[in-house]
Amino acid sequence: MVDVCLVSPSHLAANPRVVKEASACAAAGLKVHVVHGSYVPTLAQLDTEILRRAAWTGTSVAWSTGPAALSRRVVRKIARALVASAPSVFLRSLADAAHHISIAPLAATAVRIRARLYIGHCTAGLVAAARASAGNRASLGFDAEDFHRAETNTALHDSSEQRVIPFLEARDLTRCSHLTASSPLIAEEYRKVLGLEMTPILNVFPISEGPAAPVNPSARGPRRIYWFSQTIGPGRGLEEILAAIGRMRTTCRLELRGACDPAYRLRLDSIAKREGVAEGIVFLPFAPPDEMVTLGAAYDLGLAIESRDPPNRDLALTNKAFTYLLAGVPVLLTPTQAQTWLAGECGEAALLVDLSDPSRAAAELDRYFADPDRVCRARAAAWTLGRGRFNWDREGSRLAMAVASALEAAG
């Protein structure tokens, strides 16, 4: 018997929030187990390393390969066709199968982990956790990392997903005794559509993952602007920031960390050349999540570039901004609803810049870098915010208290 079982279709290495949640609960004295997906060999190796160092246990579920996965894909295709436009009886009976092929194997594994509270991540994790909690007559919880019914264009426009995700959320979220969300606006959106109260727990990082002291970038050479993700790809605002950098008087170099398709790398290099980015782009290799803060500490500015489409991006606060702040690095935020709120909370540590007008964005960045006192204040403010407010030492304690309250209420 464990106190808490977290359920997610993702790798541990691809979902640092699950790792942090498990660690926070374990640090509070709870016995924790994580049931997580496994579908990329390189990430599976990182998962093993994370588990080796963890104060909790985990089970990986390879849901994407083998004959059973092929069978589930066939069933999903049929189920999606039926629920897209057929009577609601098909939706009620086939919604799980239509949504994601990971649900059945995740649930089958999770139900064997006897827990007092099951907490799902992502819609598939929610459904699997709900099955396990029902099978073991345990409590159910959910962490809304995103506003899932508006998370992707598929969720918004695919006729099957339009019916399935709201149905699954209405069915299973209303059973939850523990509900958290990764941003205040995501919590508010779920309150609007389902009348549920979620506790916002920001997607921040432990102080221990950051540098021991502020790092000052080199005063020589170009200003180094940094962005990272698992995947360097289109639709992430990189083309827009290159257009702004190419119009700046200040010499800047854009450094990108993550896996990048060779064709897209050539495309970005071509855009940089076309826009007149003299220093070009530096491509850096993927690195483990717990190294991201220290790897970002020596940069002049961190990029948290988000759009307002799909709507979830307008509501979400991604881990990038909080990574930079904990590293003591000022952050460039784009004006989504959530990041506009965050900019107000960050004060001088943040620049709120609209990249849709590259000339204006370039002028704003030039003014910033041309003012050494402002740059110093921004770095000091980022360091203070990272150590004092936007860190997992604080948010993790709030999460552990919420989990403990749900367990106490369950008896």
Image (cartoon, grey):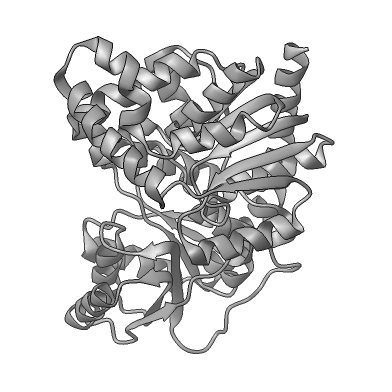
Q: Residue furthest bottom?
A: 220
Q: Nearer the viewer, residue 387 or 196?
A: 196
Give the quadrant of residue 289.
bottom right
**Residue 379 showing in the rendered view:** no
Q: Is residue 342 left or right of residue 218?
A: left
Residue at 62% over, 36% down: 6
Q: Is residue 322 above or below residue 222?
A: above
Q: Nearer the viewer, residue 337 or 5?
A: 5
Give the quadrant of residue 33.
top right
Give x and y (percent) for residue 57. 73, 46
Q: Is residue 329 left or right of residue 314?
A: right
User: Quadrant of the image for the N terminus?
Assistant: top right
Give the quadrant of residue 209.
bottom right
Instruction: Count how many numbered circles sit on residues in the image.
Output: 0
User: Quadrant of the image for the C terminus?
Assistant: top right
Give x and y (percent) for residue 184. 50, 31
Residue at 53% over, 22% down: 130
Q: Is residue 239 above or below residue 110?
A: below
Residue at 18% over, 28% down: 81
Q: Is residue 163 left or right of residue 349?
A: left
